[in-house]
Image: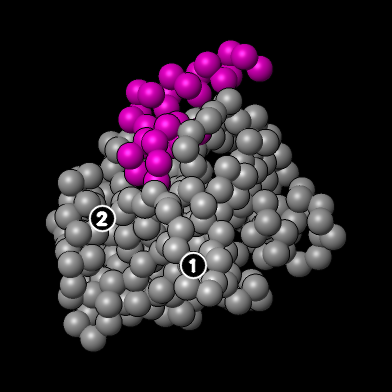
Amino acid sequence: MTDAFDVLAVGDLNPDLLVTGDVTPRFGQAEQDVSARLTLGGSAAIFAAGAARLGLRTAIAATVGDDDLGRATRAMLAARDVDVGVVAVDPSRPTGLSINLQRDDDRAILTDRGAIPALDVAAAVAAVQRGVRHVHLASVFLVPALAKHGGALLAAARRAGATVSVDTNFDPSGAFAAPVWLRDADVLVPNEAEALALAHGGDGDLLAAARDLASGGALVAVKRGAAGALAVRGNEVVEVPAPAATGPDSVGAGDAFDAGLVWALLDERPLAEALGLACACGALSLRAAGGVDGQATLDEALRLAAELRSAQ
């Protein structure tokens, strides 16, 4: 990793195996015809690819195994102009893998964490100290070291004058026990279900949940899919609709949203404009299967966000 990156993503890096067709398993050694393809996965990695696509100088701190999948994922990131100098290789564990069983209306995700939990937080802290404008933490519940020591990354970012965003993503345990440092972040970007699970109380009231998560001073931007997004920052509440979008799947759309929001905040755009750009990035990512092949360029995202504003 060289000096003076715009963004450092920290978290999970793995391939996604996208499976479509007759994906509901039938046990008893039944064999079924499906379609499958391998693409870049991991919330931190998809975010990093999206941020680089928007023109941000981006690096990622993560861990893979010493195997073909690990080499493939690093090559996929490097091909998308993401610096992989802080991607560690753990020879004792395989590279993580997520299998996405996709139907028209939903998907199930089966994940072998492999080397994902072996993230070296100290190496990520050292990378922050070498110079970065923003740090994005992803998949906190998949990476115990990140959940436990994320506060050290926040402290390093503060010392470096960098801002921090967090996308906890889903908690496979279902507990959603938020780390004590979570609300000290500058930006939280949960989806609707995650916001309700992370907040104290709220009784299913999304605005109340967002206000609770923002009570420590964070900007909370809640991703609502086709319903758009809701943001709370202090007394400011902003809602924007999502552009009409269709595609083969929604894998990585939330990570593309995160990348668009971070770009807009670093560019000091007003909150409504930032949220609209984030929604545009999320919608455009649906153009291709998987999380990275449909990601927007900056010009594409700005154009769609402008069209969205003029239609309101």
Residue position for label 1? 30
Residue position for label 2? 59
Residue 158, percent across and down?
A: 41, 63
* Magenta-highlighted residues: 283-312
- Neighbours of disc 2 within 10 Å: few (<14), some (14-19), many (20+): many
**85 lies left or right of 177:** left
Question: Could you tell me which secondary element the residue under label 2 belongs to?
Answer: strand
Q: Can you see residue 21?
A: yes
Q: Can you see residue 131?
A: no
Residue type of the residue flagged with mark 2: Ala
Which residue is located at x 43 percent, y 24 percent? 302
**114 lies left or right of 176:** left
Residue 251, percent across and down?
A: 47, 48
Look at the magenta stretch and give its main secondary structure. Answer: helix
Q: Is 281 colored magenta in this rendering?
A: no
Where's the C terminus, which quadrant?
top right
Where's the N terminus, which quadrant?
bottom left
- Judge whether 47 appears above or below 129 on screen: above
Residue 200, percent across and down?
A: 76, 67
Q: CA distance from mark 1 to mark 2?
A: 43 Å
Which residue is located at x 58 percent, y 25 percent? 244
- Neighbours of disc 1 within 10 Å: few (<14), some (14-19), many (20+): few
Question: Could you tell me which secondary element the residue under label 1 belongs to?
Answer: loop
